Image (cartoon, rainbow, N blue to C red):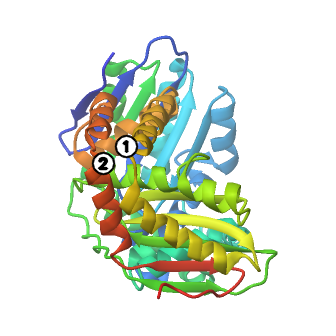
Amino acid sequence: MSARVHRLANGLTVAVEPMASVETVAVGLYADVGSRSEAEPVSGLAHMVEHMVFKGAGPRDARAIAEDIEDVGGSLNAWTSRDATVFHARVLPADLTLAVDMIADLIRAPRFDADELEREKQVVLSELGEARDTPDDIVFDHLQAAAFRDQPVGRPVLGNETSIAAITALDLHDWLTTHYRPDGLVLAAAGAVDEDALQRLAEARFGDLTPGTRPATATAAFTPGVHYDTRRFDQIHLALGYPGLGHLDADVYALSLFASAAGGGMSSRLFQELREQRGLAYSVYAWSQSHDDAGVLGLYLAAARGDAARALTLAREVMARTTEDFTQAELDRAKAQSKAGLLMGLESVQSRCDHLARQLQIHGRIVRPAEIVANIDAVTLAQARAAGTRAITGGEALASVGGKLMAAA
């Protein structure tokens, strides 16, 4: 069956994709607001809200939230990014009402107890410390800071010690009241789900949300720069970024395919030259990441301290050469990888649910997998080369953990 979209009178979007031959349903509430909408003094607020709603909402305290969903064999969780916040559940079809009720309570009736907030701040600080102690994790936050210097989108999702300490229960309430407007929310479900039942649940639990104008999100612009974390580790972890493309840019597929050819797998140029031929790095890859209005073409590598500078120089050379002699065979391989990754990923009910909501938030409509495949297939070699050239000639952001290296000359 194909996916269908409904909109409530207040603007909230409902998306459903029944799937044959599955026995579970994934359902989630997707808000198109994340950490880039925060004020700097309370950086980490969106993530703190995500944490705190699970400490008590509606008739349930934290223990009851965990027990009620697990009593039926289900799961309930959430995540926050720079652009979005998601509350999602996986249950058997008979428990869809419970799942939607619990998700609704999380954003509509959170308790936000002040004492619980102080305890949860310690949990988030522990999460922040764990991230900072993981070089191949924190280096990407450093790259984001270098690539979007002094911009909300460049700040870490988790915030920092000062901003976390500053968050109050009133801030949590104000965040939901200000940013969780129905026109920015998608209730999506996929799997063994009845379309009419989901529509009724959406109307019952979200139909009375009050429409309103949300604050505008600050625009993002790539800024060449560096961010060095000189703590000593056995290896130096490097993330190199070039200006990428927003979701709706006409060349976004071309740039993604360029990134795949340059560093998307074991057959890619970066892997073959830095690892297989030179032995300079165990882990090396490239990627293309998009926000609504900007993006990053990036590469990551980890190398021994004595090899890091040479590895970085070679990685830059590989990226530059790829723009010049990227072949049709490499493009065809990148297309095959992209299409297989898309279609294999969409075999799960959770990924189908995520896909529905994300496409609606980006495009305002469901972009079918067949349309995405067609867009991938339509990219020419000239377009892929041009997209790569446009990126790597637009400036460079460099982040490192474990040592200080030279930025681009």
| Residue 85 visible at all | yes
| Left or right: 139, with 385 as reference point | right
Residue under pointer 1: 328
Residue nearest the observer in this picture, 21 or 11:
21
Q: Are marks 2 and 1 in contact (CB under 8 Å)?
A: yes
- Outermost residue toward the top in this view: 21
Q: Which mark is residue 381?
A: 2
State the residue at coordinates (54%, 21%): 24
Q: State the separation of the CA atoms marked 2 and 1.
A: 6 Å
Q: Quadrant of the N terminus?
A: top left
Residue drawn at (31%, 74%), measured in percent from left and top?
Answer: 220
Q: Where does the image place residue 355, in percent across and percent down from the top left?
A: 39, 38
Figure label count: 2
Give, as a three-letter code, the residue at label 2: Leu
Q: Nearer the viewer, residue 379 or 366?
A: 379
Secondary structure found at label 1? helix
Q: Position of residue 223 (x, y in %)?
A: 37, 82
Q: Which mark is residue 219?
A: none
